[in-house]
Image (spheres, rainbow, N blue to C red):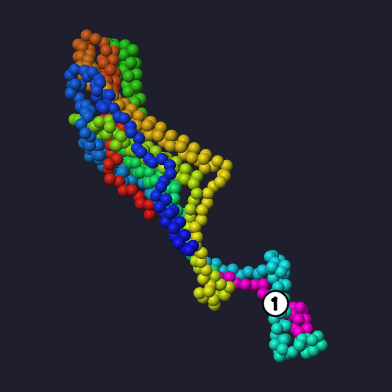
Amino acid sequence: MWTRRFLACFLLMTIVAGCKVGPNYEPPQTPAPANWSGLENPTTRPAGPAAQSPGPTTRPADLATWWQTLRDPLLDELIEQAVESNLDLRIARARVAEARATRGIVAAALWPQVNLGSSYSYQGRSLNAGARTEGGLTVAEQARNTAVNAAVRRAVTGAGGAAATPGGAVGQAITGSVANLLQGNGAKVSRDQNLFQLGFDASWELDVFGGNRRAVEAADADIGASEASHRDVLVTLISEVALNYVQLRGFQRRLDIALENIRIQQESLNIAEDLLRVGFENQLAVDQARAQLATTQSQLPLLRSAIRQTIYQLSVLLGQTPGTLLSQLEPEGSIPKVPEEVPMGLPSDLLRRRPDIRTAERQLAAATARVGEAISDLFPKFSINASIGPSSRTMRHFFDRQSLGWSIGPGVTWPVFDGWRIRSNIAVQNARQEQALALYEQTVLVAFQEVENALVAYQEEQIRYQSLIEAVQASQEATEISVERFRHGQTNFLDVLESQRSLYASQDALIESETTVITNLISLYKALGGGWELPVPVASSE
């Protein structure tokens, strides 16, 4: 009868176990703009070459390997090395493996827990202390009475059933036996014993209200969040390598321009000193030429320091010691050129592409599942417990059938009062879910902002770059004119120095702007979430 009842209860609990308390997660519906603001309201471009500069479009974007549009084989090689050996990326891969292993720990609660145990003990017990028998006797007293009764039976049996009179032979035999027992000669009880035990213990908590399954849901979402975070690290790494590489080439180009201007300004200083000696110029012209030369020379340590520091940064990004790439990167190279077209796609594509948005969405899913896990603690916990195994005081009878013991039965626990711990935990999880939702919405808004910022910066810097091209051309013409007029005695030497100073400033600004155009384009690619599609091995949890 009890077996049928047990099976019926087990079947009922198994059916009920299909339910899960708490809210079911639904991805948030986030509205996205129909188009990018920077493309709907394009900046007014100046006439001439600036009108022909490349511009972003809403054409579907293929950003998996966006850096290859810069057409620089060395940059491609550096990014490939960084993906293989960067330490931040290795940390992110390890976190993915950690999340997967944690999921295994959480999912283990859905399965029966079986333990094999064995023990041996050698015990000595008190015979005169502890629990008493039904007659109020200790274990030792009961043992002596049992021994006395046995002695009487043996004496009577030996007398052949004769009457046990006090003076008779039977009476004397009984009296002697009892006396010996009472003196401790025949009523000894062993205090020591061995106990050998071996058995399997099993317990299975039936997830009737879905608390453990909610925990698994949260762990699955944590895996998704860690994988998206790993992709976010990859996007950041690729953009950082490209940014540092372009800045390095910009610093090198600015150093060349500074050295060229130093050469020209040194020649001008020599001319001013020669003119001073023959009386055609005054000391002011010489001092101004010397000051201009010294000012330009003061830029060299800054540029050389920036070059070295950028190479060191690239080396660390590639997981190498700072000086490893000096021989490879110190030779000057050209600044990469912008591609003919920059397809961006639509704003709605950003919600699917950006890894940080995916990370925030998975964190929201995990927080929602943990609300249900906390609510399940309000309900009773059902479990099945079982044990089986032999137990004996001697090894000789250890494997006998009579030594085998077993037990099985259901159990239930239901918290009655816990000082509002469970309800407080539910409030905590609800608050964390609200935080996760707000964080997701904020991440989306910041993502749109980053794209718009990068887009307007890229477009405006192109306009500035075109203006600086015109400024450099005008400065070169002004320098040539001032030098020619000075040779014919139509102007003084100070005009030559001023035109040279203006030319160097405009040339340096032009190279800096050219570098900024490329770095803004890289920032735009990063804001669009390009690069995470690159296949990267992820560490296993095993």
In this picture, residue 498 sits left or right of residue 147: left
Looking at the picture, how far across and down is residue 330, in whole percent? 29, 37
Where residue 119 appears, as percent x and y from the top left, is: 55, 67
Q: What amino acid does circle 1 point to?
A: Thr
Residue pictured at 43% horizontal, 42% vertical: 22
Residue nearest the viewer, comparing 481 with 490: 481
Q: Residue at x 70, y 75 (%)?
A: 143
Residue placed under numbered mark 1 in the picture: 146
The relative height of residue 16 versus residue 515 in the rendered view (above or below) is below
Q: Is residue 389 above or below residue 370?
A: below
Please name the residue shown 27% across and 24% down the image: 38
Q: Position of residue 242 (x, y in %)?
A: 29, 36
Picture quadrant of residue 351: top left
Number of residue marks: 1
Q: Residue at x 48, y 58 (%)?
A: 384
Residue 276: quadrant of the picture: top left
Res. 77 in view: yes
Q: Residues within 10 Å of mark 1 (few under 14, many from 20)?
A: few
| The C terminus - image quarter | bottom left
Please check the rendered image and state whether residue 191 is part of the magenta-colored stretch, yes or no.
Answer: yes
Does residue 313 appear anywhere in the picture? no
Q: Quadrant of residue 30?
A: top left
Q: Secondary structure at mark 1?
A: helix
Question: Between 265 and 202, which is closer to the camera in this rendering?
Answer: 202
Q: Nearer the viewer, residue 89 or 470?
A: 89
- The spot of residue 469 in percent (x, y) is 22, 21
- Let me know if residue 310 is in the magenta part: no
Q: Which residues are magenta?
A: 174-196
